[in-house]
Image (cartoon, helix red, strand yellow):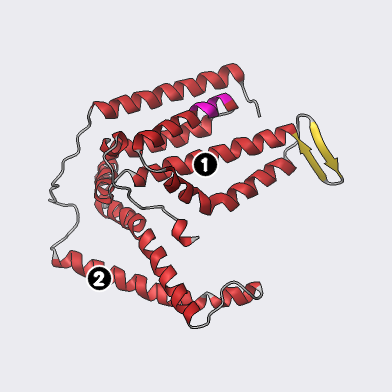
Amino acid sequence: MLSDITIGQYYKGDSFVHRLDARMKIILTILFIVIIFLCKNFLSLSLMLLLTVISVLLSKVPFKMFFKSIKPILPIILFTVILNIFYIDGGTTLVSFRIITITTKGIFTAIFMAVRIICLIMCSSLLTYATVPTALTDAIERLLSPLGLLHIPVHSLAMMMTLALRFIPTLIEEIERIMNAQKARGADFESGKFMDRVKAMIPILIPLFVSAFRRAYELSFAMTCRCYHGGEGRTRMKQMKLHSGDFVSLGVFAVSLAGVIVLNHYFGSLI
C-alpha cells in the first residue's frame, strides 16, 4: 500500500503539460479545484471530467500512476459513497427496510461525489507529476512574492513546502525498509487487537523519526556548505517565461468556468 502513494513524485517527460510554466500550472490547478466545486449537476461535472481526461492525455503520464494516487484514497471514497447512499433523502425510494432507505437521489449524489473526488486527486497529482521540484519552488515563490511587502519570508516558505512534498516518497521508502527489517526480526503488524497493532507501530515510528531528523540535519549541513542563505540576491539558472501554450490553457479553463456557470444556470441541480 505504501508503494502506491505517489504524491510528490515527478514523472519525467516532454509533453505539453510538462512544458507549461510552473506558475501557470499552479494557477490552473487552483482554478480547476474552484470550478469543480461549482459543479451542481452531471452535465457540468461531465465537462470537468472531460477536461481532466484531456489534461491527463496531454501530459503523457501513464494512467497507472494516477491509479496509484487514487488507490490509497479508495477507502475514503467508498466511505463517502456509502454515507451518501444511506443518508440522502429525496427522489424515488428504491429500498426501504427498517432504518435503511436507498433513494435515487442518494445514488446520484454518491456517484457525483465519487467522480468529483477522483477528478480532484488526478488534477492535484498531475501538478507534481509534470513539474520538477525546483520549478515548483520558484513558482510558489513568485506567486507569493507580494507577501514579501509584509516582511514574510516567502522564499523560506516556498522551500519548506517543496521539500515537504519532495521527501514524502523518501519517507515512504524508509517506512517500507524499517517494516521489512522489523518483520525479519519477527514483528507482527497485522494480527492481534487494535491496541496491540498500535503498540507494534512503535518500533517503526522511533527509527523513522531518527532517520527523518538525520536527513534534515544532512540537508541543512549540505545547504550551509553551499553557502545557501535564502532568496535574497539569489539568481536562477532558468528564468520563467509565459508562452502561448500557457495562455491557451488559461483560456480553455476560463471557457470551462463559463460553461459550468451556464450549465448550472440553465439545468440547475440534478442531484
Asked whether 160 or 44 is in front, the reply is: 44
Residue 116 vs 137, above or below: the answer is above
To which residue does mark 2 refer? 218
Q: Is residue 134 magenta?
A: no
- Residue sitting at 27 percent across and 71 percent down? 217
Residue 189, image x, y percentages: 56, 74
Q: CA distance from mark 2 to mark 1?
A: 37 Å
Residue farthest to the bottom, as pictured: 185
Residue farthest to the top, as pictured: 266
Q: Quadrant of the C terminus?
A: top right
Residue 58, image x, y percentages: 35, 33
Residue 244 vs 126, above or below: the answer is above
Q: Earlier in the sequence, mark 2 or mark 1?
A: 1
Mark 2 burial class by Cα count in 10 Å: few <14, some 14-19, many 20+: few
Q: Secondary structure at mark 1?
A: helix
Residue 128, image x, y percentages: 35, 47
Mark 1 burial class by Cα count in 10 Å: few <14, some 14-19, many 20+: many
To which residue does mark 1 refer? 118
The amino acid type, in three-letter code, at marker 1 is Ile
